[in-house]
Image (cartoon, helix red, strand yellow):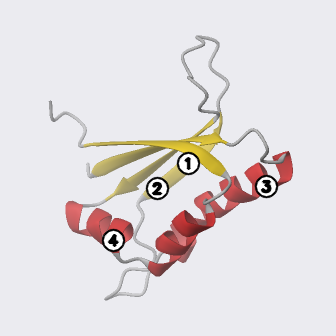
């Protein structure tokens, strides 16, 4: 198994539901839009996400979560540092998201 990348968004209180929905759809669309630089094919192994519905009350303001899986560290590095689709998406969050949390892990490595 590769690298699991978890992203949590806390939207600004002024962000409309329509904008939140658009951000979520565009986040999930990265799975098809992000192309590997050498193969020009999608390289995200999986992508899922949605609105929090946990009854535990530990969200701390984070309302939406996403999980992306990469095959390896090289793919993650390209995604974070060079992928034009991902970088444009991140830039588009300015003024909309007030807080982001990211946790990455390799399953079974402690």
Q: Which residue is mark 4?
A: 81
Judge depth for marks 4 and 2 and give the one in front. 4
Query: Element at badge 1?
Result: strand
The answer to which of marks 4 and 3 sits earlier in the sequence is 3
Q: Which residue is mark 2?
A: 46
Query: Which residue is nearer to you in this view: 17 or 96?
Result: 96
- Count all numbered tags in the image, as a single digit: 4
Query: Measured from the top left, where is residue 50 in percent x and y?
Result: 65, 41
The answer to which of marks 4 and 1 sits earlier in the sequence is 1
Q: Which residue is mark 1?
A: 48
Q: CA distance from mark 4 to mark 1?
A: 21 Å
Crowding around mark 2 (Cα neighbors within 10 Å: few <14, some 14 to 19, many 20+) is: few
Q: Is residue 92 left or right of residue 20?
A: left
Query: Element at badge 4?
Result: helix
Q: Are marks 4 and 3 in contact (CB under 8 Å)?
A: no
Q: CA distance from mark 4 to mark 2?
A: 19 Å
């Amino acid at each position: 198994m590769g690298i699991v990348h978890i992203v949590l968004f806390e939207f600004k209180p002024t962000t409309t539901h329509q904008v939140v929905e658009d951000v979520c759809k565009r986040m999930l669309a990265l799975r098809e839009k992000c192309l590997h630089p050498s193969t020009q094919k999608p390289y995200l192994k999986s992508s899922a996400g949605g609105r929090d519905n946990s009854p535990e009350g530990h969200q701390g303001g984070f309302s939406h979560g996403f999980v992306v899986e990469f095959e390896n560290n090289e793919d993650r590095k390209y995604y974070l540092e060079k992928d034009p689709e991902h970088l444009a998406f991140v830039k588009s969050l300015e003024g909309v998201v007030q807080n982001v949390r990211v946790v990455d892990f390799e399953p079974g490595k402690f």
